[in-house]
């Protein structure tokens, strides 16, 4: 037995060395290439660093949390960012919001609300995997167009985890059924964030950039935005479920061994937590009036959970998946570095001109893919902020509708190819049921197909409603 363990340890060590060497070697190779004229030295070093970090993340040669901390340190070591600029994004408003949203999930699970939500979901949708997964996908997509996609993800992920645990399907064991649901939830939630202006910060940001670009001549209101985007969102919901069902269909036809007994009356802790949640949602919806960032009501919510004794903060910290949160912080930090160093603009200036003279579909799809690519490496709001100042002038030169290009941005930056791309995928990954390689195998084809769905939808639907000609 000891000999077997020794062989396994040796194989693991050998695998780590090989994967790390490949990642480091490719990074050094990129570093040694001549620096292009329109790329800063800092940007060149960042692209080399990104090559190494992404390979380490994807291969999971070392724990991804360690790689995340290495990313922040390397930004300083390679003189790409100052120490303040490199580490500050780890505590940015967006990252702190994700931290508190994941804490919400811990609270839901600990007080019993997650199990109650799951009871009512299964009572409505049933335990048949096909029906349940379809209703779940459409429900997550629609809900995330109104609520934050991270909120929807954390509620559903922490509702499903106890079910899988009761079935003996524990994290890290490679069971296909929980992997299917744990990847379906974040992909469906992410696919709906563009449906209304409430779904994410990238949506109003795109309208703001469009308004400035047109010198105030193009304005899109709240209801008009819904008419333009909401119907397409239904297509992305169904397409997300269909892609997952085709590519990763579980063998099980039904969730067996699930306890569907009525949970009974709500406990005082459940009632208290539910009231705090409702107040928090009201404050989020009132953001235009209060001017508060999403993280402010979230922080008050944590106070509302802990101060009355519904749950202790120590319990939240003990149950919290810290590694996933650190990884998201590293993703934001690298995204900021891409903006500051000019690496993102360089990629846009190299890739996007290749679309000049191509068909309308190819140009729109190219714009869309670039947005999804950027969103996989940085926040979707940052991706919109980076791409639109470049794609809008290009669209004007190509005699294309600036409205269509602007509205395409928040839509297509909803689709990502890496776990680090958005809070929902980080939250689902924190449950431990799938690896980054598992995710990439699904996310890449999902992203590419959804971009086709959105491009064709906007080319057919938007002219029908008179949005673009």
Image (tube, rainbow, N blue to C red):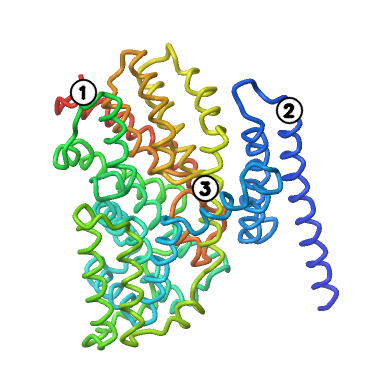
Residue pictured at 53% horizontal, 38% vertical: 340
| Of the image marks 3 and 1, the number of the one nearer the N terminus | 3
Image position of 397 (left or right of 434): left
Q: Which residue is mark 2?
A: 33
* Mark sitting on residue 299: none
Rendered position, 453 above or below 37? below
Q: Position of residue 113 (x, y in %)?
A: 30, 78
> In this rendering, which labeled residue sits more in front, label 2 or label 1?
2
Q: Position of residue 96 (x, y in %)?
A: 44, 61
Q: Secondary structure at mark 3?
A: loop
Residue contact between numbered discs 3 and 1, judged by CB atoms under 8 Å: no
Residue contact between numbered discs 2 and 1, judged by CB atoms under 8 Å: no
| Of the image marks 3 and 2, the number of the one nearer the N terminus | 2
Q: Which residue is mark 1?
A: 468
Q: What distance separates the C-alpha of mark 2 from that of mark 1?
A: 43 Å
Rendered position, 41 above or below 161? above
Q: Position of residue 237 (x, y in %)?
A: 30, 47
Q: What distance separates the C-alpha of mark 3 from that of mark 2?
A: 26 Å
Nearer the observer, 101 or 93: 93
Q: Is residue 424 visible?
A: no
Q: Secondary structure at mark 2?
A: loop
Task: Please tell me how crowded label 1 is: few (under 14), some (14-19), or many (20+) other residues with Cα within 10 Å.
Answer: some
Q: Which residue is mark 3?
A: 418
| Of the image marks 2 and 1, the number of the one nearer the N terminus | 2
């Amino acid at each position: 037995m000891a000999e077997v363990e020794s062989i396994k340890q040796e194989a693991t060590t050998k695998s780590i060395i090989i994967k790390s060497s490949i990642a480091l070697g490719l990074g050094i190779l990129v570093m040694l290439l001549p620096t292009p004229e329109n790329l800063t030295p800092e940007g060149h070093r960042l692209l080399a660093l990104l090559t190494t970090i992404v390979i380490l993340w994807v291969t999971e040669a070392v724990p991804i949390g360690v790689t995340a901390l290495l990313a922040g340190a390397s930004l300083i070591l390679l003189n790409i960012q100052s120490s303040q600029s490199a580490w500050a994004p780890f505590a940015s408003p967006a990252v702190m919001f994700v931290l508190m949203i994941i804490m919400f999930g811990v609270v839901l699970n600990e007080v019993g609300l997650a199990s109650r939500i799951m009871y009512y979901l299964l009572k409505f949708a049933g335990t048949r995997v096909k029906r349940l997964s379809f209703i779940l996908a459409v429900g997550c997509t629609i809900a995330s167009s109104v609520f934050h996609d991270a909120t929807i993800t954390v509620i559903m992920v922490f509702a499903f985890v106890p079910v899988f645990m009761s079935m003996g399907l524990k994290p890290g064991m490679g069971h296909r059924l929980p992997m299917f649901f744990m990847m379906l939830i974040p992909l469906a939630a992410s696919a709906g964030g563009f449906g209304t202006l409430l779904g994410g910060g990238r949506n109003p940001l795109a309208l703001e950039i469009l308004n400035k670009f047109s010198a105030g001549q193009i304005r899109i209101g709240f209801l008009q935005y819904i008419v333009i985007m909401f119907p397409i969102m239904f297509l992305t919901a169904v397409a997300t479920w269909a892609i997952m069902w085709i590519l990763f269909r579980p063998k099980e036809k039904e969730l067996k061994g699930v306890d569907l007994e009525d949970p009974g009356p709500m406990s005082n802790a459940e009632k208290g937590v539910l009231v705090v949640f409702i107040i928090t949602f009201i404050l989020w919806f009132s953001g235009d009036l209060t001017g508060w960032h999403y993280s402010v009501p979230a922080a008050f919510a944590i106070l509302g959970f802990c101060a009355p004794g519904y749950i202790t903060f120590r319990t939240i910290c003990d149950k919290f998946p810290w590694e996933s949160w650190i990884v998201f912080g590293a993703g934001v930090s690298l995204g900021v570095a891409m903006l500051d160093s000019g690496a993102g603009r360089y990629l846009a200036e190299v890739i996007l001109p290749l679309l000049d003279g191509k068909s309308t579909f190819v140009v729109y799809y190219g714009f869309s893919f670039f947005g999804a690519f950027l969103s996989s490496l940085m926040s979707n709001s940052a991706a919109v902020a980076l791409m639109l100042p470049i794609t809008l002038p290009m669209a004007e030169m190509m005699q294309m509708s600036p409205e269509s290009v602007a509205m395409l941005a928040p839509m297509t930056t909803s689709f990502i190819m890496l776990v680090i791309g958005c809070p929902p995928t980080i939250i689902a990954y924190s449950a431990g049921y799938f690896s980054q390689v598992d995710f990439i195998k699904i996310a890449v084809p999902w992203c590419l197909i959804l971009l086709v769905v959105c491009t064709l939808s906007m080319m057919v639907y938007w002219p029908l409603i008179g949005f673009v000609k």
